[in-house]
């Protein structure tokens, strides 16, 4: 059986166009894979650290939590509990930041709180 009326040039150009489309898709996929691998590589090589200082509201919240945890745990003398509660009630965040800050992490705030109230912490003696 013979096919007639088909122009070989039309067939060749259609096949070439199809092959070009496939090649273009393959190139796009390769470029996409390279971009993804580049992004993944960049993400592995990069570390971001927060260098911004905590604002007064953050410092006040962390300091209050520190003091409340000390009071909650208990085991302190009545005088120590009263002194810590008084410090909590009269806490001046601006003065605290001026004296011990600026702070960039919670651990820095905790260390400063210990420095500020460490002398007030007196555990009860076992009898």
Image (cartoon, rainbow, N blue to C red):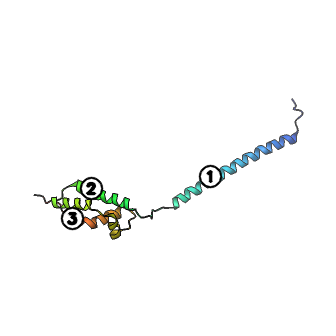
Inter-mark Cα distance, 3 to 1 = 61 Å
SS label for mark 3: helix
**Residue 73, x across and y down, in percent:** 23, 54
Identify the residue at horizontal 35%, vertical 61% (top origin): 59
The outermost residue toward the top is: 1
Secondary element at image label 1: helix
Which of the 4 image quarters holds residue 63? bottom left
Image: 86 above or below 19? below
Q: Given this view, does label 3 or label 1 mark the residue nearer the observer?
A: 3
Query: Which residue is more in the foreground, 7 or 127?
Result: 127
The tag earlier along the polypeptide, 3 or 2, is: 2
Please tell me which of labels 2 and 1 falls first in the chain.
Answer: 1
Label 1 sits on residue: 33
Q: Is residue 43 left or right of residue 117?
A: right
What mark, if any, has residue 113 been given in the picture? none
Task: From the top left corner, tell me how far across and down residue 70 is, in percent.
Answer: 24, 57
| SS class, disc 2 | helix
Q: Residue at x 81, y 42 (%)?
A: 14
Q: How far apart in space, not on screen, are marks 3 and 2 (Cα)?
A: 14 Å
Residue visible at 23% across and 56% down in the picture: 71
Quarter where residue 80 is shown = bottom left
Residue that mark 2 sits on: 69
Outermost bottom residue: 99
Residue 76 left/right relative to 67: left
**Which comes before the other along the chain, label 3 or label 1?**
1
Label 2 crowd (10 A; few <14 / some 14-19 / many >=20) = few
Residue behind mark 3: 120
Indicate the position of residue 104 as horizontal and vertical percent values: 40, 64
């Amino acid at each position: 059986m013979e096919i007639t009326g088909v122009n070989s040039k039309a067939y060749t150009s259609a096949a070439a166009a199809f092959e070009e489309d496939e090649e273009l898709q393959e190139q796009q996929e390769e470029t996409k894979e390279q971009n993804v691998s580049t992004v993944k590589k960049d993400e592995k090589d990069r570390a971001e650290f927060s260098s911004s200082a905590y604002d007064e509201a953050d410092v006040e919240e962390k300091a209050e939590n520190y003091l409340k945890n000390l009071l909650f745990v208990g085991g302190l003398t009545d005088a120590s509990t009263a002194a810590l509660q008084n410090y909590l009630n009269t806490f001046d965040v601006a003065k605290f930041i001026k004296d011990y800050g600026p702070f960039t992490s919670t651990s820095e705030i905790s260390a400063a709180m210990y420095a500020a109230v460490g002398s007030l912490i007196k555990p009860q003696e076992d009898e």
